[in-house]
Amino acid sequence: MSHKRVAILLSGGGSNMLALLDSMTGDHPARPCLVLSNDPAAGGLTRAAARGVATAAVDSRPFRGDRLAFEAALIKPLQQAAPDIICLAGFMRVLTADFVSRWQGQMLNIHPSLLPKYRGLHTHARALAGGDVFHGCTVHEVTGVLDDGPILGQARLTVTPDDTTKSLAARVLKQEHQLYPQVLRRFAAGDRTPVCLG
C-alpha cells in the first residue's frame, strides 16, 4: 500500500504535531515526510527529529513585511518533500491565498474554537466573554480566507462556571490531540465525512 505523504507546519512546541506523528503507524494510510517551521528554534523541530522525521526551518523574521518572499522560501522544502497533505499544527503565520491555492483541497488546519465562531486569536477568552455554554476545536480544510473552509471535524466540551482561559485552553488542547489524528486518518483515506467528538 502506498502511503500519503504528510508535511506538518508548526511554530512552537508541536504537541499537535506529536499527536499526528504518533498516529501515523500501522494500518494508517499516511506517513510523515517533513516537519517545517517558521522558527528555527521551535521545540517541535527537535521533537520531530528525535522521532526520525525530516525537518526544515525557514525563519520568518528576515522576511518581515514581505509575505510573498517568505512563502517563496517556504515552498522550496515543501516541493522537495512532495507532500500529498499539509497539516498546519500551530503554524502562526497567515498564508496568502496564492500559497494556499497550490495545495487547495490538500491542506488542513486545527483551530481552537467551534468554527464559524471565533476566527483568529484569543478564542478561549472570547468564548468566556460571550458566556458560551459550549466551546471546543475544529479541523477544517484551508482556503484563502482565515479559519474558513469546509469543516472536517469538531470536538465540543461544556464550559463550566469555574473555567478560566487557562483551564479552557488545556481542556481544548486535549481534544485537539484526539480530533486531529482522527480527521487526518479519515482524510488520508479519501473520506471527508466530518468527525464529531463530544
Image (tube, helix red, strand yellow):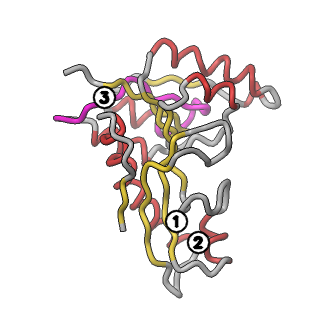
Question: Could you say which disc has been placed on residue 18 in the image?
Answer: none
| Residue placed under numbered mark 3 in the picture | 31
User: Which residue in the rendered view is the most extreme toward the bottom?
Assistant: 161
Q: Position of residue 195 (x, y in %)?
A: 36, 54
Side (left or right) of 122 relative to 176? right
Residue at 50% x, 42% y: name it: 89
The disc, 3 or 2, on the residue closer to the chain's N-terminal end is 3
**Disc marking residue 165:** 2
> Is residue 159 in view from this perspective?
yes
> Where residue 167 sits in the image (x, y, percent)?
50, 73
Element under label 3?
strand
Indicate yes or no whether the magenta region holds residue 4.
Answer: no
The span from disc 2 to disc 1 (Cα, nearest Å) is 6 Å
Residue for badge 1: 169
Amino acid bearing label 3: Arg
Q: Which residues are magenta?
A: 26-45
Label 1, label 3: how far apart the Cα atoms are: 28 Å
Label 3 crowd (10 A; few <14 / some 14-19 / many >=20): many
Local SS, label 2: helix
Foreground mark, 3 or 2, reads: 3
Quadrant in which residue 75 is drawn: top right
* In the image, residue 43 lies in the stretch drawn in magenta: yes
Judged from the image, the secondary structure of the residue bearing numbered disc 1 is helix
User: Residue 30's image quarter?
Assistant: top left
**Could you say where residue 180 lies in the image, as x and y percent from the top left?**
39, 48
